[in-house]
Image (tube, rainbow, N blue to C red):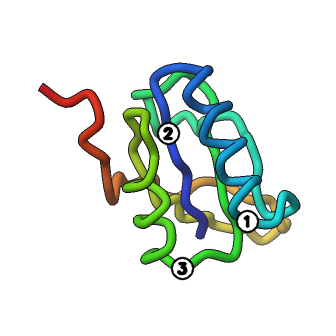
Amino acid sequence: MYYLFVFTKTSDTVKAYEKACALYSKQNVTIMPIPNQIDESCGLAVSIHDLDICEQVRFLAGLDTPASLFKVDVDIDKKGSKGIQAAVKVGQNQIGAP
């Protein structure tokens, strides 16, 4: 399982990545492609490893760009291959909301 911060603009993704790198160890922050199960994005997401859900939500609330937080559950098959079992939105900030 891991969490993804999802954005509608690539520039917002890069901005969040830079903020996460400034706040946390850069080796724990990743920009990655969005899984097919998530369709409301620019195609890239930010993942911050080794943070509990409370810290993930705190980071989401501190962003100054519209963003959603998804919990992604991973399944490993008998061959050891990883596959996405589910991607569920667990939060969204209200930046830019009407």
Q: Is residue 22 above or below residue 94?
A: below
SS for callout 1: loop
Q: Amino acid at mark 3?
A: Asp
Q: Position of residue 39 (x, y in %)?
A: 43, 28
* Sooner in the amino-acid sequence: mark 2 or mark 3: 2
Residue located 69% across and 61% down the image: 23
Residue 55 relative to residue 94: left or right: right
Q: Quadrant of the C terminus?
A: top left
81 or 64: nearer the viewer: 64
Circle 1 residue? 24
Work out whether residue 74 or residue 98 is closer to the camera in this orientation and state it.
98
Q: Earlier in the sequence, mark 1 or mark 2?
A: 2
In three-dimensional space, the C-alpha distance between marks 1 and 2, rounded to whole angstroms, equals 18 Å
Q: Splitting the image into 4 quarters, where does residue 27 fall?
A: bottom right
Q: Which mark is residue 52?
A: 3
- Residue at 55%, 34% (x, y): give it: 36
Instruction: Please say if 78 is above or below 6.
Output: below
| The quadrant where residue 16 appears | top right
- State which quadrant residue 42 falls in: top right
Query: Label 1 crowding class (10 Å Cα cut-off): few <14, some 14-19, many 20+?
Result: some
Residue 68 location (% of width, % of height):
39, 44
Quadrant assignment for the N terminus: bottom right
